[in-house]
Image: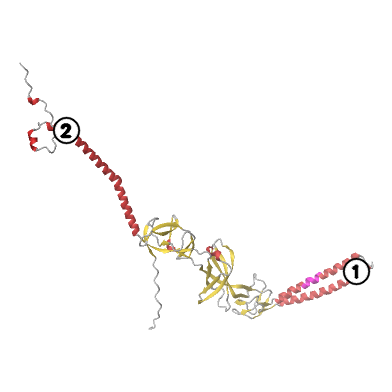
Amino acid sequence: MSPPAPSPEKKPVPQPQPAPATVPASAKTQAPAPATAPAKATEPRKSSSSGMLWVVIGLLVFAGLFYFLGVAPRLAQKSSLDQEQKLNTDRTVIYAQARSAAPKTELSLPGTLNAFQQASIYARTNGYVKRWLVDIGDLVHEGDLLAELDTPEVDQQLTEAKATVEQAKASLVIAQQTADRWDNMVKAHAVSQQEADEKDATRDEDKATLDADQAIVQRLTDQQNFKQIRAPFNGTITHRDIEVGNLVVSGNGTGTHELYRIAQIDPLRLYVNVPEAYAPAIRPGVKATLHVQSYPDRIFEGDVVRSSGAIDNASKTLQTEVDVANKDGALLPGTFAEVRLEIVDDTPTILIPANTLIVNSSGTQVALLENTNDKEGDHFKVHLIPVKVGRDFGTEVEILQVLQAGDRLVTNPPADLSDGMLVTGKPLPKPPAPPPFTIDRKT
């Protein structure tokens, strides 16, 4: 029996190739594929599509990471910088300009007028006040008689001293004659040389006694002359403590008192303490003007004549003397005066408003505005620069270096002002002019 023929259904069927997209629909119906053929034909395509999907997903993840880790922070930072720059540009500050100091400045200082010279008059001899001739406020000249004393004790001592001098003169005459006689006897070999020398010594002793007695007479004469109290120089009597009959004692120690006080009031001296910063400009001849409360509408002139030549360690000032002419006697010693010295600065410095200074832990600084060359001309860049402050004039201070006249400086700088900040600057407005003075004639 022959083996059974193989069934046509189990024969391997060749896999149909996918038809192109242009194959007509009738051709698809003529050769239908078995039920299992499509599953086998799509397996490689499914694997390829899955790989492509994972690649796309990886690319998307990488792109997301790149955006969130790289691009997004940069965009946020740029946005923050843009916003900060916008805020900085929108910040408006007021600035003032630095200026050169005037070559001549006025230094105002307090002072007290003093007499050019002043003396207290005491008695130089003991006695009683016989009379006094001048009182306070009187003008006297050198040598004028101020008072006269009665000195009976001195007069008596002077009389005795003069009598003693006459006795000494008589003794000296006898001693001189004796010495001359013995000198002649020595030449004749009548007496010894020793005896002649003794006579000469006696003569010399009497002569010395006479000189001493005459010195006593001169001293008592001077004391007698002192009973006339006279002015030592031209001046004004500013104090009197003398009455007729007062007992006065010579000297100025215990038991004595001041009879007169005299002051020379033309010119007057005035001492002022000049701060150390102005000391180099103080020299003889510097002009000064004085204002006193008793003459508010009058200006007195003076000149610097000398200074102490050394800075006081305690006050750091230079004592300076100013002499003031006082021909009419209007100024009185002891008057308080405001002195204005005309200081000439050979090298003028820069002055800036005091409210432009920034004082912090970094030292003393100013906020300098640098032009950014914008169209409007009001946008600036801030630069914080250190400065060295010199003299303080109240509303203005002196800067010794760095700045130049015309530099723009921020006034009342805010605390958050930083170096490099962009700001809008406006000039400090000028103060309004005072209204004109008018008189209401209706009243």
Q: In which quarter of the image is the C terminus?
A: bottom left
41 relative to 220, above or below:
above
Q: Is residue 234 above or below residue 95?
A: below
Residue 175 % position (x, y): 86, 71
Q: Which of marks 2 and 1 is nearer the N terminus?
A: 2
Specify the amino acid type for callout 1: Asp
User: Quarter of the image containing the N terminus?
Assistant: top left
Q: Is mark 2 on a helix, strand or loop?
A: helix
- Numbered circle sitting on residue 43: 2
Q: Residue at the spot x=82%, y=70% of the render?
A: 207
Q: Mark 1 points at which residue?
A: 183
Tell which residue pokes out farthest to the left in this image.
1
- Within 10 Å of the Cα at label 2, are there few (<14), some (14-19), or many (20+) other Cα atoms? few
112 shown above or below 315? below
Apparent side of residue 107 relative to residue 199 in the rendered image (left or right)? left
Q: Which residue is pictured at 53% across the width and 68% down the height?
A: 343
The residue lying toward the viewer, choosing from 44 and 118, is 44
Q: How far apart are marks 2 and 1 (CA)?
A: 178 Å
Q: What label sits on residue 409 in the rendered view?
A: none
Residue 88 appears in which quarter of the rendering?
Answer: bottom left
- Residue 431 place in picture, x, y as percent: 40, 69
- 133 in magenta: no
Q: Where are the magenta residues, as a range?
A: 208-214
Is residue 321 at all visible to an observer of this figure? yes
380 lies left or right of 100: left
| Residue at image coords 41%, 57% | 383
